Image (cartoon, rainbow, N blue to C red):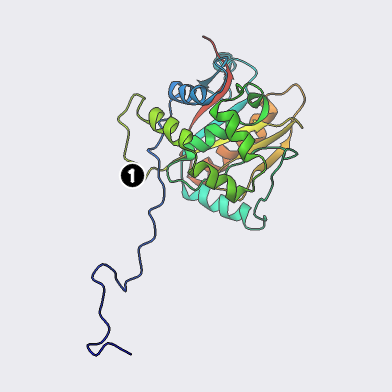
Amino acid sequence: MADSEGSKVDPHTSNETPAAPKKQAFVPLENNPEVMTTLVRHLGLSPTLAFHDVYSLDDPSLLAFVPRPVHALLLVFPVTSTYENARRTEDAPLPEYSGSGPEEEVLWFRQTIRNACGMIGLLHSACNGGAREMISPSTDLSKLITSALPLDPASRAHLLETTPAIARAHASAAAQGDTAAPSADDKVDLHFVSFIKSANNNLWELDGRRKGPLNRGQLGAEDDVLAEKALDLGVRRFLKREEEGEGGELRFSLVALAPSMD
């Protein structure tokens, strides 16, 4: 029988729709080769590798300062309308990437954590190409690769969200650097994109905000990712589009994952 006084409302509940859970966010990573090197070594990359600034794409005397071979290039740039339009246009006809398993030519991570593009770029650089062979066994990075390989992209993204070692390493690195770290809630317009060479000699552009990894073309067996052909297919092509779309304004930095000079 119904209560004669009518239904009573529990004061600890509400008829309002609960707010969506707050999206996970990282403190933005400083664009600093020393910080990047410390982070990937902490996760398990060999100390024989390090990140180095690349000061020119054309001057041989400046390019000569970069140790070879270069296993990955990490391009850091402000997110512009040109980048966004090009991303949407190129991605529109492409299917959502669904690769997984040991036969996958590259290991690609979708970015779902806010302000984690720096970490995603570092993972793409260290977990692919020649650098992967220089990850120490039984480390956080080797365990991450083993866990991620059989997963589809959505499950890989969830793996990153729920791996404490990744969050701890990122937080430690973000607290370093030459400038005060911003808040995890700050809006940061810098983005990180990695270029790597696969075992099949293909140049891949790896960007966690895209639908999947992008094969930019075939390289020679002797080419690394700082070779002329690799630059033409990758970084120079990218920057030419940005320069033309932004009326000649071009802001970027480039770091290379290559042998350490220690």
- Residue 216 in the image, given as x and y percentages of width and height: 69, 39
* Residue at position x 59%, y 19% in the image: 258
Density class for disc 1 (Cα within 10 Å; few <14, some 14-19, many ≥20) is few
Observer-nearest residue: 170 or 250?
170
Q: Residue at x 44, y 36 (%)?
A: 167
Q: Residue at x 42, y 42 (%)?
A: 115
* Residue 5 placement: quadrant: bottom left
The kind of residue on which mark 1 rests is Asp
Residue 164 location in percent, x, y?
A: 46, 37
Q: Is residue 202 left or right of residue 258?
A: right
Residue 110 shows in this picture: no
From the top left corner, tell me how far across and down residue 46 is, in percent: 57, 18
Residue at mark 1: 186
In the picture, measured across the screen, residue 166 lies left or right of residue 225, that is left
- Pick the front one: 187 or 248: 187
Q: Which residue is at a point 63% across and 16% down the rendered structure image?
A: 68
- Residue 221 figure quarter: top right
User: Which of 134 and 218 lies nearest the eye of the viewer?
Assistant: 134
* In the image, farthest residue toward the top: 262
Which quadrant of the rendered structure holds the N terminus?
A: bottom left
Q: In the rendered view, tell whether residue 188 sits above or below residue 122.
A: below
How many numbered tags mark residues here? Answer: 1
Q: Position of residue 17 (x, y in %)?
A: 35, 69
Instruction: Decide if residue 128 is in sight here.
Output: yes
In the displayed structure, 53 sits above or below 242; it is: above
- Residue projecting furthest to the front: 1
Mark 1, secondary structure of its residue? loop
Q: Is residue 56 left or right of residue 32?
A: right
